Image (spheres, rainbow, N blue to C red):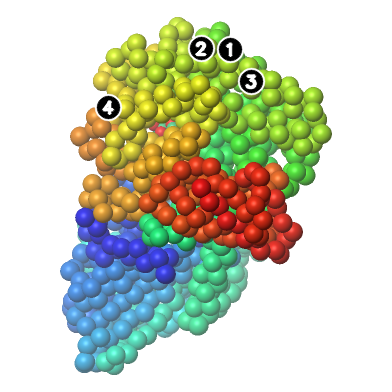
Amino acid sequence: MQFGHFDDEAREYVIETPHTPYPWINYLGSQEFFGLVSHTGGGYCFYRDAKMRRLTRYRYNNTPVDDGGRFFSINDGGDVWSPSYRPYKTELDFFETRHGMGYTRITGERGGLRASVLLFVPVDVNAEIHQVTVTNTSDAAKSFSMFSFVEFCLWNAEDDQTNYQRNLSIGEVEVEGGAIYHKTEYRERRNHYAVYGVNAPIAGFDTDRDTYLGYGNGFHEAAVPHAGKSGNSVASGWYPCASHQLEIELAPGESKTYTFVLGYLENAEDDKWESPGVVNKTGAKELLARFATNDATDAEFAKLNAYWDQLLGSYTVESGDDKLNRMVNIWNQYQCMVTYNMSRSASYFETGMGRGMGFRDSSQDLLGFVHLVPERARERIIDIASTQFEDGSAYHQYQPLTKRGNHALGSGFNDDPLWLIAGVAAYIKETGDFAILDEMVPFDNDESLARPLMEHLKRSFNHPLEKAGPHGLPLIGRADWNDCLNLNCFSSTPGESFQTTENQAGGVAESVFIAGMFVAIGPDYAALARRRGDDAEADRAEAAVATMKQVVVDHGWDGEWFLRAYDFYGNKVGTNETAEGKIWIEPQGFCIMGGIGVADGKAIKALDSCREHLNTPHGMVLQSPAYTTYQIQLGEVSTYPPGYKENGGIFCHNNPWIIIAETVVGRAEYAWEYYKQITPAYREEISEVHRLEPYVYAQMIAGKEASRHGEAKNSWLTGTASWNFVTVSQYLLGVRADYDGLVVDPCIGAEVGEYTVRRQIRGATYVINVKSTGAKGAKLTVDGVPIEDNTVPYAVAGSIVQVTATI
Ligand code: GLC
Ligand code: GLC
């Protein structure tokens, strides 16, 4: 069952009903100002940091779900309704929400009146634009009132939800003309304020929530729109909000358009006041003037669309499969951008009050983002590496506002260091910018400890070698990629966080997964050293990788698949010898990506075991069978009920590792089948089961032991976005950047048939026509001339290179 459809021409997903199984959302903003908006107008916005600079309030765990947002309400002769359906939930004659690239357009029609709200954040403006067009579709003249509404958050979103002792007394606003100013705490230590204005004369306003709603009312029964008259209330403490009243007259067939601007402004400390107690509003007035005409707003919207044309131009595919085309050309890349911008901070599953930027997460996000805006990837790499410790280990996260690492999410995750090598290698392959390796980058943000980035990579590379356990495998530390496999933790205190509680220093628990990572990512470190002319270091690195491969073969193989780990006592984890948690997905993917067992059949055996034990029609579960009881020696993984999250859920993040592994062994059909299982466009038809947005990946789909098998959770902000883009673009379609050229090595299901990839990289364009699919081993021609291997050398900037690949 579907609740909408893709409009690929417009790059939109069109939601046809307000009654989706869950709020289906979109993101607005690309630089510093961001908003989340659901298909019924819910959500919130913030400047840079969803916790510290929240403009509008949002209630988590609320009922009804998704109440609160930017709401427009119409009183048409006593008939009160909202074009976004919520909050009034009055039935509409027509409803449609179009989520596009950085904008959302919500349209509702009732009783011969159509209202369409376009929400977007212009490319370089710190504001949300709400452009409302009302059209009289009846054959009689209409005269009606329209009300806007947003509720302000008192800036710090966490404090806003908890500190009522203070917060119920500090709310302050100003109203001037049609503009409403939110200035809570501006009188003391804040130099920033918000404005909500409109480019038309207003008939009234409200800034006090209780006046607007009427005491005790929900948003769906707000008093002011029902009365058809604003209260002209000025908030003093309690709950500041902003609402405008517009009186509108329309002849039959006539349309009118209004631009509302919800902006964030800062003033210099010595320039805060216009007069005592009155905010200096110069910045806000300039902002509103910029959007004084609807044409100016249209021009900003056109700029946003052009920005996305350019971004999405660096990798496109044309094939006979619409679902594949729309994921590759539009939605998967779009999700990579959003995930890169947000990390794991603000979604309908992340409150925006907890996590900053993850070392591991951001490094992986780079993999799917680096081709979009390489300069921003460079900056991110330096930020991440600056939080690394001298011994190669890392803070697990850092705050975007301060760029300082902290231990709020724990420390000692021994996979962290290696992800930095993966991110840097991807960046250099994309850009050829080897100079980044000479950049002086601090350790632990201490400039006196600055060393070249290459030295950081060396310490990343050495970390698993220096922290090796009894079998020569890397020690797991607090956990590796799997946050929930906590082998040194032994927590028995209710509610204690597995990420931050004291870890025992056993020196025994080892990770086969980190060994796989080392083997898969280590060669990039060696390649960088060799390209810098440091052959001795490259040789050392290659030898260390070869040794680790052998260690995995000797101590990391269970007979039918790769082991997962050794626990605190040296017992095997992920072995056929136990009844539960026999086989885990992560080491199968990474060991094979590192080439282990490819020559001697172990890789195929492991992948066949994945197919037998892990695969479901909804994707591969993380491990199987799921744990039915709490295993104190394994940590958080077994705290989840069977089939959810790391305990046997389908973690979409690491399905791509298996897909890549299938391409490594050349099994195009399995790789393709697994890709389609988890990819949202292919799941659109089962939206009633999947329940979340059919245009973006979710972190998890409930696994086979869960009663809600197939139901997705935690959409949008997940490493799934970048790993799936890497998988489909570089391994299935098979076009990937390498140091000296573009590798063309397709391995995708036969049903895809002939396709063409256009890839822009380092200033040149490559038009790659793949003539046949269903297997691996393409022979290439470059501008008509056959070449020996699979690497198309980089051409000079400006050139267009024609490549054909035939299998
Ligand atoms: C979450 C975390 C990620 C971790 C994964 C598996 O997605 O953001 O860092 O690797 O869970 O536990
Ligand atoms: C929990 C989740 C895991 C996430 C971690 C950090 O352990 O299960 O997926 O990575 O929290 O937030």
Q: Amino acid at mark 2?
A: His
Q: Label 4 CB, ligand 2: below 8 Å?
A: no
Q: Earlier in the sequence, mark 2 or mark 4?
A: 2
Q: Residue at x 21, y 92 (%)?
A: 140
Q: CA distance from mark 3 to mark 4?
A: 37 Å
Q: Amino acid at mark 1?
A: Gly
The residue at which mark 3 appears reads as: 546
Q: Splitting the image into 4 quarters, where does residue 763 fall?
A: bottom right
Q: Earlier in the sequence, mark 3 or mark 1?
A: 1
**Residues tagged 1 and 2 counted as in contact (Cβ below 8 A):** yes
Q: Label 1 CB, ligand 1: below 8 Å?
A: no
The residue at which mark 2 appears reads as: 555
Residue 315's place in the image compared with 340, above or below, is below
The residue at which mark 4 appears reads as: 642
Q: Label 3 CB, ligand 1: below 8 Å?
A: no
Q: Badge 3: how crowded within 10 Å, few (<14), some, or many (20+)?
A: some
Which corner quadrant holds the N terminus?
A: bottom left
* Disc 4 versus disc 1: nearer the observer: 1
Q: Position of residue 94 (x, y in %)?
A: 23, 73
Q: Amino acid at mark 3?
A: Ala
Between 196 and 205, the one lying in front of the other is: 196
Q: Amino acid at mark 4?
A: Pro
Q: Position of residue 308 (x, y in %)?
A: 53, 64
Q: CA distance from mark 2 to mark 4?
A: 28 Å
What mark, if any, has residue 472 been given in the picture? 1
**Residues tagged 3 and 1 counted as in contact (Cβ below 8 A):** no
Q: Earlier in the sequence, mark 4 or mark 1?
A: 1
Residue 394's place in the image compared with 124, above or below, is above
